[in-house]
Amino acid sequence: MKLFKILILALFAGVLIYASLDLPYRGDPDNRMHAERSINDTAVIGNYAIQEAYNDAHTPNMVTVILGDYRSIDTFGEQIVIYTAGLITLLVLRRSRRRKKS
Amino acid sequence: MVDFFTGHYAYWFTLILLCVGLYGIIFKRNLVKKTIGLAILQASVVLFFVSIASKWDATVTVIDKNIPVEQVESYLNPLPHTLMLTAIVVGVATLGVAFTLLIAIYNRYGTLDEQELLEEIQ
Amino acid sequence: MRSKFHSPIVLLGARLLSPYIMVFGWYVIFHGHYSPGGGFQGGALLAASILLIRVSGGRIVSRMQLREYFNTPLAIIGVFIYFLTGIVAMVAGGYFLDYGQLPIPGMEPYWLRYTGILIIEVGIGLTVMAILVMIYDNMVKGEDYG
């Protein structure tokens, strides 16, 4: 049983390292994700956010503009997730009732 | 050859951290240690995404007065940082719920060991 | 965690540090526009300043700082601030959470977006602080049930 688990872990690590040989070099400015235009000649989100964030909201921090203005519904959903997690701790740990003997 | 190693070593360290987390989930018998393995796995995924967004000789994602904003090679890509803020907070909420369930299991069964729990449930 | 920790030095250090961590937490929330920070980070710092007294002082001492039944109303107020900003922007024309249509007089569109992001960050900070303290309180209270 333990040998089976060791085999699965080694196989998974091997598959991951084989998949990471094909990734682009880290920090290369010619990456596909740092490009100016995408393959279909539309604007890539990284460069659009760097160039237009100050004109839209007069805020020097680009991450806050993306989180609060371009993707504000994602942040709203995340607030609901935190609130639900807090409510779960309230509802799970209750005083257990006495079971009636029937 | 040296270029290949310098470009890829960050990914390999992150994968080793992921395998350490998986080892904790699969091989340990106590339930609290499995939860700690889950937390290590989430941290390694966050680290992988943030390490992708780097560029050579680039500065932080806050606009500087001296560097004009049209020069996009000197600012980091802000999109993975934004997504990972959400991922960190969701990880904290998941850990909170996991520990609450562990307290409820301990109150009901009296043990936190995996083998004894499987025998007591059946 | 219900009784006091048996060393008075730890309690003295926590009592001295806790107000300054809270002020730094508010600073991180409000300066999220000009430096790295924002709603989530400031909320975590505020929760840390309250949890320091809860861990080292016990239940009787920490009731003087923040009562336990204030956690749920604070969390609900945080979610409401976010939701009301969206509804007000939708009522005044435009889609949900469009800050360009907020009815504040005498501002250009980009200053309206600046103010909208600021209101949202305060709401997020309040919710994160209340929920992190509430998770700890319920876990301590639920230890002796069952």
Image (spheres, coloured by chain):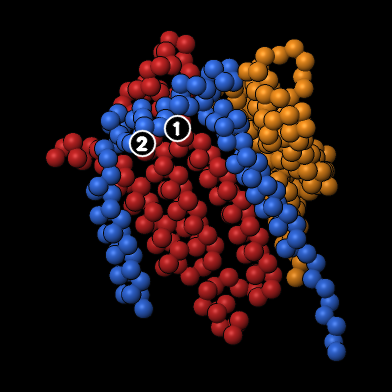
Chain colours: A blue, B red, C orange
The subunit letter for the residue under badge 1 reads: A
The residue pinned by badge 2 equals: A40
- Image quadrant assignment for residue C108: top right
> What's the residue at 60%, 41% (across, down)?
A74
Q: What crowding class fits label 2: few (fewer than 14 Cα within 10 Å), some (14-19), or many (20 or more)?
A: few
Q: Quadrant of residue C115?
A: top right
Q: What kind of residue is marked 2?
A: Asn
Q: Position of residue B19 (x, y in %)?
A: 36, 57
Q: Residue at x 35, y 22 (%)?
A: B73
Number of marks present in the image shown: 2
Q: Residue at x 42, y 30 (%)?
A: A43
Q: Is residue A4 visible?
A: yes
Q: Residue furthest left?
A: B1
Of residue B25 and residue C124, the one placed in the foreground of this image is C124
Q: Earlier in the sequence, mark 2 or mark 1?
A: 2
Q: Where does residue C56 sit, x and y in percent of width and height?
A: 69, 44
| Mark 1 lies on residue | A45
Residue C62 shown left or right of residue C100 in the figure? right
Q: Among all residues in the image, which is located at the extreme top?
A: B66
Are both tags, 2 and 1, on one chain? yes
- Taking the spot 50% from the left edge, 41% from the top edge, the residue there is B84
User: Helix, strand, or loop for circle 1?
Assistant: helix
Residue C86's place in the image compared with B56, above or below, is below
**Relative height, residue B44 to residue B83 (above, below):** below
Mark 2: secondary structure = loop
Q: Return the x and y of residue C74 as percentages of the image width and height.
A: 78, 40
Marks 2/1: CA–CA distance = 13 Å
Q: Quadrant of residue A67?
A: top right
